[in-house]
Image (spheres, helix red, strand yellow):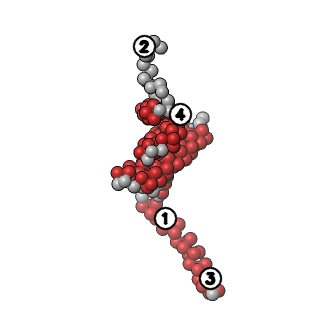
């Protein structure tokens, strides 16, 4: 038993010494290509990964698997909110130090915000399809709050609230109505 522990410890130690050397030769071969695990489009923690989750939810809805679609949309919504918060934090941390970084984080934050709205709209549509309009209302209100009624997503969410009967006054997008 003790010899097995010693052999395991030696194997782990040897692995620690060999792996940096192997990683360094791969990096030296292509110095511009860094192993950006979180940047991969399928399984990373980025905008593309959230878009992929939304697409998976869309596919699940098309296949009639509404439970899986709800899970995918919820996951997309959660991941997009986390990305948004992290991008905002990084933007604030670098403000006044390096203008490039806040600009990049703000752009990524806008993308993440749009994805939150998209996931919310799809989730609300799913709740409406399942005859759960009371569950759709808070999700739709969040879209209006995040995107404002001036943006297409906000307008769509508000229109859904009108259709549900939660609000009565239609939004005309800044157009004046007779008698107002």
Q: Dot 1 corresponds to which residue? A: 23
Q: Dot 2 corresponds to which residue? A: 178
The residue at the point 34 percent across, 51 percent down is 62
Give me the C-alpha separation between circle 4 and circle 3: 58 Å
Q: Nearer the viewer, residue 176 or 163?
A: 163
Q: Nearer the viewer, residue 36 or 151?
A: 151
Give me the C-alpha separation between circle 2 and circle 4: 27 Å
First of labels 4, 1 by sequence position: 1
Give me the C-alpha separation between circle 2 and circle 3: 85 Å
The circle on residue 145 is: 4
Q: Secondary structure at mark 4?
A: helix
Labels 4 & 1 near each other (Cβ < 8 A): no
In which quadrant is the N terminus drawn?
A: bottom right
Residue 7 falls left or right of residue 143: right
Give the vertical position of 176 relative to 165 (above or below): above
Q: Secondary structure at mark 3?
A: helix
First of labels 4, 3 by sequence position: 3
Q: Secondary structure at mark 2?
A: loop
Labels 2 & 4 near each other (Cβ < 8 A): no
Q: Which is more foreground, mark 2 or mark 4?
A: 2
Q: Is residue 49 visible?
A: no
Q: Dot 3 corresponds to which residue? A: 5
The residue lying furthest to the top in this view is 179
- Pinpoint residue 141: horizontal percent, then vertical percent: 52, 36
């Amino acid at each position: 038993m003790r010899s097995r522990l010693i052999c395991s410890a030696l194997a782990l130690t040897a692995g620690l010494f060999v792996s940096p050397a192997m990683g360094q030769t791969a990096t030296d071969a292509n110095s511009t290509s860094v192993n950006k695990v979180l940047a991969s489009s399928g399984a990373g923690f980025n905008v593309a990964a959230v878009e992929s989750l939304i697409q998976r939810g869309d596919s699940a809805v098309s296949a009639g698997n509404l439970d899986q679609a709800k899970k995918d949309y919820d996951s997309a919504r959660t991941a997009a909110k986390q990305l948004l918060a992290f991008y905002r934090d990084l933007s604030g941390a670098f403000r006044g130090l390096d203008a490039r970084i806040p600009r990049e984080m703000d752009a990524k934050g806008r993308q993440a915000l749009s994805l939150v709205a998209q996931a919310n709209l799809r989730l609300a549509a799913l709740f409406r399809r399942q005859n759960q309009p009371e569950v759709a209302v808070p999700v739709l209100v969040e879209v209006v709050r995040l995107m404002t009624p001036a943006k297409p997503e906000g307008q769509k969410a508000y229109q859904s609230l009108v259709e549900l009967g939660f609000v009565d006054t239609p939004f005309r997008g800044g157009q004046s109505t007779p008698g107002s």
